[in-house]
Image (spheres, rainbow, N blue to C red):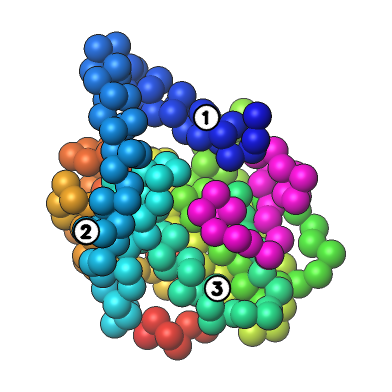
């Protein structure tokens, strides 16, 4: 079985188990039926939602529509779009991605660090102790850092602070970091995000409709939102920046 199919099976299994746990078996079965239908309708979503844009720091960016992980129904629609824009700003630069996310949607040539996900082109090391062989001009991470120290044993709420400090030390002079964190996925991060202890700057996107529209909002409004309520997955996203980002000023 190819890595793409294996990854898809893992996504479907996680979603089924999550729905079963939260709402019961029959709801989970119905949800999976809807999910398969939605995947088949991906071309239609590209023609409708794919033509719409969202605003991030004065930039109009298109929603990213893809069948894998049904991006048209979650925060991946804005995360991958933001990634494409940021990568375009760093063509030819040394780039590290923490968490093997973008390769499921786009051709990638940058270095990928992921402790758990299999892949011959992935560095399997812990982000908190990773020692790079080179320094990076750009480090990116999408809906990954919230799992550090939280979905691991033993749990360590302070590990994300060490991980980000380690990533800062992995930057070349003038290097910068962009990372997204879905609000509420890891409750331990809420006070760190509220006090802005993780990044140099934070910006916020919130989901406002069943059709997966996102708009910019304030920190106070973003941190009120829950994960998986009222919509599936991230209902608000923190975009954290480290270093100088004149494009987003």
For the residues labelled 1 and 3, the Cα–Cα distance comes to 27 Å
Q: Residue at x 39, y 81 (%)?
A: 248
Report the residue marked by disc 1: 10
Q: Answer whether residue 177 is magenta in the image.
A: no
Q: CA distance from mark 2 to mark 3?
A: 25 Å
Which of the numbered marks, if any, corresponds to residue 30?
A: none
The quadrant of the picture occupied by the C terminus is bottom left
Q: Which mark is residue 87?
A: 3
Do the numbered discs 1 and 3 sit on residues whose CB atoms are within 8 Å?
Answer: no
Residue found at the far right of this picture: 133
Assign a secondary structure to mark 3.
helix
The quadrant of the rendering that contains the N terminus is: top right
Tell us which disc is closer to us: 2 or 3: 2
Provide the residue span drawn in magenta.
Answer: 102-124
Q: Position of residue 53 (x, y in %)?
A: 26, 69
Rate crowding at label 1 as few (under 14), some (14 to 19) or many (20 or more) other CA atoms within 10 Å: few
**Residue 235 position (above or below residue 108):** above
Is residue 152 rendered to the left or right of residue 63? right
Horizontal side of residue 121 vs 233, given as left or right? right
Q: How many marks?
A: 3
Point 26% across, 29% down: residue: 34
Q: Which residue is mark 2?
A: 48
Spatial CA distance of label 2 from label 1 is 28 Å
Residue sitting farthest toward the left: 209
């Amino acid at each position: 079985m190819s890595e793409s199919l294996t990854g898809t099976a893992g996504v479907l299994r996680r979603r089924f188990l999550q729905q079963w746990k939260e709402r019961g078996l029959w709801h989970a079965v119905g949800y999976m039926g809807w999910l398969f239908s939605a995947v088949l309708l991906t071309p239609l979503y590209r023609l409708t939602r794919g033509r719409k844009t969202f605003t991030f720091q004065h930039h109009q960016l298109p929603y990213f529509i893809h069948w894998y992980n049904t991006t048209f129904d979650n925060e991946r629609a804005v995360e991958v779009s933001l990634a494409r824009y940021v990568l375009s700003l760093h063509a030819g630069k040394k780039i590290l991605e923490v968490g093997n996310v973008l390769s499921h949607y786009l051709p990638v040539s940058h270095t990928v660090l992921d402790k758990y996900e299999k892949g011959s082109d992935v560095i399997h090391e812990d982000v908190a102790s990773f020692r790079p062989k080179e320094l990076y001009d750009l480090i990116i991470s999408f809906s990954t850092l919230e799992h550090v120290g939280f979905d691991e044993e033993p749990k360590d709420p302070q590990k994300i602070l060490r991980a980000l400090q380690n990533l800062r030390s992995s930057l070349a002079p003038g290097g910068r970091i962009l990372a997204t964190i879905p609000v509420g996925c890891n409750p331990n991060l809420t006070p760190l995000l509220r006090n802005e202890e993780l990044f140099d700057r934070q910006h916020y996107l919130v989901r406002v409709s069943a059709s997966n529209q996102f708009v910019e909002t304030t920190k106070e409004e973003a941190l009120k939102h829950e994960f998986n309520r009222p919509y599936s997955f991230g209902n608000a996203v923190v975009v954290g920046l480290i270093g100088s980002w004149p494009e987003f000023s």
